[in-house]
Amino acid sequence: MLNDRSSALALLRTRRSTRPRDLVEPGPDADALRWMLEIAMRTPDHGKLHPWRFVHVAKGRRDAFADLLHRAYRAENPEPGRLESEAVERFARQAPELVVALSSPTPEHKIPVWEQLLSCGAACMNLLHAAHAMGFAAGWVTGWAAYNDEVLARFGAPPERIAGFIFIGTPAGEPEERPRPAHDEVASGWAG
């Protein structure tokens, strides 16, 4: 049996998503964030297409990001209620650091788009693992903003899509453990 106490296995077994609203300072500094992103880029990438991009929304750009989200939300919901507006504002400002992950496929390439999308998901997961390995926590979320054309237009253009908003910081408390599937629920042997 593998030594479950190895540092790599311990990290993989203990990584948990943390709600972005539960992430506080300190967040990673610029060097740490760069290192996390470089680790994220070490993902399976059939065809060497790097069908993903990462856009850091720095603290100094959170006001502009909040303005973008409010405009985009009001375009879909012309008269938002106070609670809706507050939720948009919280989303824009939660957690010390924010990285917008973009799926950036090359549709005309011989590598199927499906494989390119999987590579993007793997790159996002590597970013979450890197944050955890460096002593931080992260939350990968989507929500309405990930599917909004106006928001996408400020980060990329079709065929790109927002794969998610990855918030990074220090957990304010112990992250919740969520129920995990039992091994036999999701793994089986091939019967031929």
Image (spheres, rainbow, N blue to C red):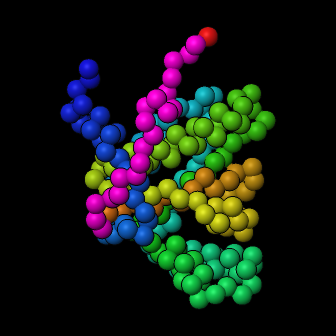
87, 101: nearer the viewer: 87
Q: Is 69 rendered above or below residue 123?
A: below
Q: In the picture, which quadrant includes the C terminus?
A: top right
Q: Quadrant of residue 26?
A: bottom left
Q: What secondary structure is the magenta-colored segment mainly?
A: loop
- The spot of residue 74 in percent (x, y) is 71, 81
Q: Is 46 rendered above or below residue 42?
A: above
- Residues drawn in magenta: 172-191
Total labels: the figure holds 0
- The spot of residue 104 in percent (x, y) is 66, 46
Instruction: Tell me which residue sits at (75%, 53%) in the image.
Output: 158
Residue 64 visible, this angle:
no
Q: Is residue 189 magenta?
A: yes
Instruction: Tell me which residue sits at (58%, 59%) in the image.
Output: 142
Residue 123 visible, this angle:
yes
Q: Is 24 rendered above or below residue 133?
A: below
- The spot of residue 87 in percent (x, y) is 54, 78
